[in-house]
Amino acid sequence: MQGDVSGYRERLVKFVESQGITLNYSDQIAPAKGLSHGGKITLLSRTQPGEEFSTLAHEIAHEMLHRGDRRTLTTKQVRETEAEAVAFVVCQSIGLDTGSSSADYIQIWHGDANLLRESLEAVQQTAAIILGAISPEVWPALP
């Protein structure tokens, strides 16, 4: 991953906390880089800042998009594709180049253009909320 997430990482953590979501770090979740469930996000300890940011964006997207009824109305394929698409948009918007990792992840879950098109509104709205929340104007006191 290429790009500087300084400042944005702290703002994303603040946003997660403002949503009432607990953030933890653990080595026990490996090989997963992150997990989210019911108001809790766990990230793999000691990952590079860009990878940590991207994973946190993915997991907060799950928390925002896939709670309650929507979780039971969507497949794992849809949920993983949507969360990764949100993470991709957020990362690209702050200048973090994730290379092919998002496309590779979506392909693992057999996501395709049709699925992304069907999820476009949810992905756009969720990414816009996250980006609005982590903009320097929202958390100006942070670096």
Image (cartoon, rainbow, N blue to C red):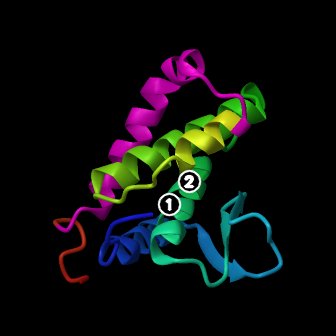
Q: Residue at x 39, y 36 (%)?
A: 125
Residue 65 appears in view: no
**Three-letter residue code for mark 1:** Ser
Picture quarter with the C terminus: bottom left
Task: Identify the element where label 1 is drawn.
Answer: helix
Q: Residue at x 80, y 71 (%)?
A: 29
Picture quarter with the N terminus: bottom left
Tell me which segment is drawn in magenta.
Answer: 108-136
**Image spot of residue 28 (x, y percent):** 83, 78
**Whether label 1 touches label 2, CB < 8 Å:** yes
Q: Which residue is mark 1?
A: 54
Residue 37 shown left or right of residue 85 in the figure? right
Task: Inspect the magenta stretch and tell me whether residue 5 lies in it.
Answer: no
Task: Inspect the magenta stretch and tell me whether residue 124 lies in it.
Answer: yes
Mark 1, Cα crowd under 10 Å, few <14 / some 14-19 / many 20+, is: many
Question: What number is the disc on residue 63?
Answer: none
Task: Identify the element where label 2 is drawn.
Answer: helix
Residue 10 to residue 78: above or below: below
**Image spot of residue 64 (x, y percent):** 55, 48
Question: What number is the disc on residue 58?
Answer: 2
